[in-house]
Image (tube, rainbow, N blue to C red):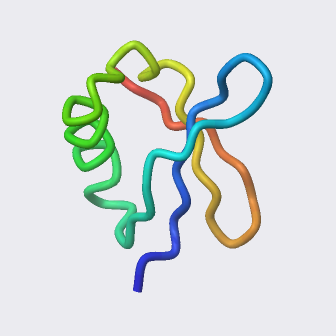
Amino acid sequence: MKEIFVFAKVKGGKQFIGMYGSMESLLEEVDETLEEMNKTDLVNDVYFLSNGEEYKLLVG
């Protein structure tokens, strides 16, 4: 079951990236999704919700 909601904070709101099911592969899957969407410029603005809490996805 996919329970991790991933989004990017952009001017004026949030841009949905996807729903994911595993913390272990989250960064890799989000990277792939951003490449497919041609939105790699959002990589430093990515956050995720897990169990109702918001976290910044740290890259690098």
Q: Quadrant of residue 10?
A: top right
Q: Identify the residue at horizontal 64%, vertical 57% (top origin).
A: 49
Taking depth in this image into account, of 37 and 47 the one nearest to the observer is 37
Q: Identify the residue at horizontal 62%, vertical 65% (top origin).
A: 50
Residue 43 percent across, percent down from the top left: 42, 23
Quarter of the C terminus within the rendering? top left
Question: Quick check: 29 left or right of 50?
Answer: left
Question: Quick check: 23 left or right of 7?
Answer: left
Q: Identify the residue at horizontal 49%, vertical 18% (top origin).
A: 44
Question: Quick check: 53 left or right of 29?
Answer: right
Q: Identify the residue at horizontal 27%, vertical 42% (top origin).
A: 33
Taking depth in this image into account, of 57 and 35 the one nearest to the observer is 35
Taking depth in this image into account, of 42 and 21 the one nearest to the observer is 42
Quarter of the N terminus within the rendering? bottom left
| Residue 48 to residue 10: above or below | below
The number of callouts visible is 0
Residue 28 percent across, percent down from the top left: 23, 44
Residue 20 percent across, percent down from the top left: 39, 65
Residue 56 percent across, percent down from the top left: 61, 36
